[in-house]
Image (spheres, coloured by chain):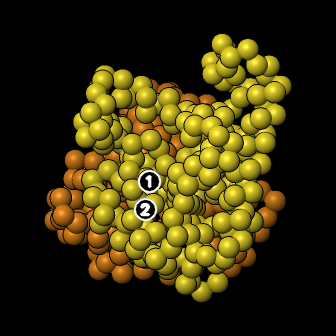
Chain colours: A orange, B yellow
Amino acid sequence: MKIVTVSREFGSGGRELGKRLADALGFDYYDREIITQIASRHGLTEDYVEAVLDRNMLSSFTLTFHNSFVGLDSVMNFQTDLLAEQTKILRSVAKSGRDCVIVGRNADVILNDENPFNIFVCADMESRIARCRNFAQKHEKADEIDIEKNIKRIDKERAKSRELFSDTKWGDSRAYNLTVNTSGWSIKELAGVVSFYVRSWFDRVK
Amino acid sequence: MKIVTVSREFGSGGRELGKRLADALGFDYYDREIITQIASRHGLTEDYVEAVLDRNMLSSFTLTFHNSFVGLDSVMNFQTDLLAEQTKILRSVAKSGRDCVIVGRNADVILNDENPFNIFVCADMESRIARCRNFAQKHEKADEIDIEKNIKRIDKERAKSRELFSDTKWGDSRAYNLTVNTSGWSIKELAGVVSFYVRSWFDRVK
């Protein structure tokens, strides 16, 4: 079975690349589905589940739960439960035996035993701001000024979330099989090129 | 004109990848040639020229020139001269108008105006040690124990040498178009895959 994981900087087009990659390879695709599944089981919103899963509680507890009158212990236990559930879902995806692309969720680390092909997607800040601005305009979410700040905040959260699972650093190219900079590419064209790279990896002489 | 630059971690197989890439693309290849040219012009050894070019003098002066009875000023002037010469040679390579692959020499930064396609080549420490050991055995240079120490030292020098030219960090994937991890690949196979990636970049719809 072939698993491809895609980790990405916010605004790099990594999610679109993952989706198109799955299409080009004919693989199943997982992204938001994992959050959706956990949220619906617990009757929680997806955003809340995401916040609980992705934050490094020890460092962001006061920020997130400052006004919620719950103790750090119970929040951390809840996080541990949800993280275990996420791991279980990811493992069951792997166990299904179907080739797949998984975007985010630290799947590269969690499914390490399955020898996934791990891709990190980045881009220069200029292209990322342009992509976010474009997205915001389409969805009529304005406030351009904070785009860069927002990008940096989300990247920081992703980096911290990885710390829960791994000693290797989020975005450090030694921790991935391939690191793709999307600046200057159309994601559509790039997906074709990267799918050739991935195919060659799984077909290579070992 | 198409320029591909290859920066690499020591022991990652980056030089071999660069050579094979040039062959696969039918591009000219530059690596040691630049050092050789400078060395022969000045009647110096290649190793000496490399040391002068690559070290960040302000931080390694005492280490390198401790016993040489030359002043820091004159060493730094000499370095400035050789760096200018290196830049001149790299520019003349670019001006020749011939497609080429250049390994090392901070060519990605120096030739930035020519819009090169910049590749960084890395690998996990285990594969790098294995590659260096293999090389050492072939060339009967033993002393395995220090391999990892040596790898780290040379990487550090490469990182520092980049500091002379650029604010971006050596090995930070945002500063390159593509970052390739050679672990698990035969360099020969990988060169074919990367050449497709590079070709697609230069052929892409802009």
Q: Secondary structure at mark 1?
A: helix
Image location of residue A39, percent across then percent down:
40, 57
Q: Is residue B134 above or below residue B58?
A: below
Residue at (53%, 51%) from the top-left corner?
B32
Quarter of the N terminus of chain A within the rendering: bottom left
Q: Is residue A205 above or below residue B204?
A: above
Circles 2 and 1: CB atoms closer than 8 Å: yes
Q: Secondary structure at mark 2?
A: helix
Q: Amino acid at mark 2?
A: Lys
Residue at (52%, 43%) from the top-left corner?
A159
Image location of residue A102, percent across then percent down:
36, 63
Report the side of A191 relative to A122 (left or right).
Answer: left
Q: Amino acid at mark 1?
A: Arg
Q: Which mark is residue A135?
A: none
Instruction: State the CA–CA distance, disc 2 to disc 1.
Output: 6 Å
Q: Within 10 Å of the Cα at label 1, are there few (<14), some (14-19), or many (20+) other Cα atoms?
A: many
Q: Which mark is residue B19?
A: 2
For this orientation, the residue located farthest to the bottom is B205
Residue at (49%, 49%) from the top-left corner?
B8
For this orientation, the residue located farthest to the front is B43
Query: Which of A110/B140 is in front?
Result: B140
Query: In this figure, which residue is indicated by the disc labeled 1?
Result: B15
Q: Is residue A154 visible?
A: no
Q: Is residue B71 visible?
A: yes
Residue at (79%, 64%) from the top-left corner?
A144
Chain of the residue under the numbered disc 2 shown in the image:
B
Report the side of A53 relative to B98 (left or right).
Answer: left
The quarter of the picture where residue A197 lies is bottom left
Query: Which of B167/A134 is in front?
Result: B167
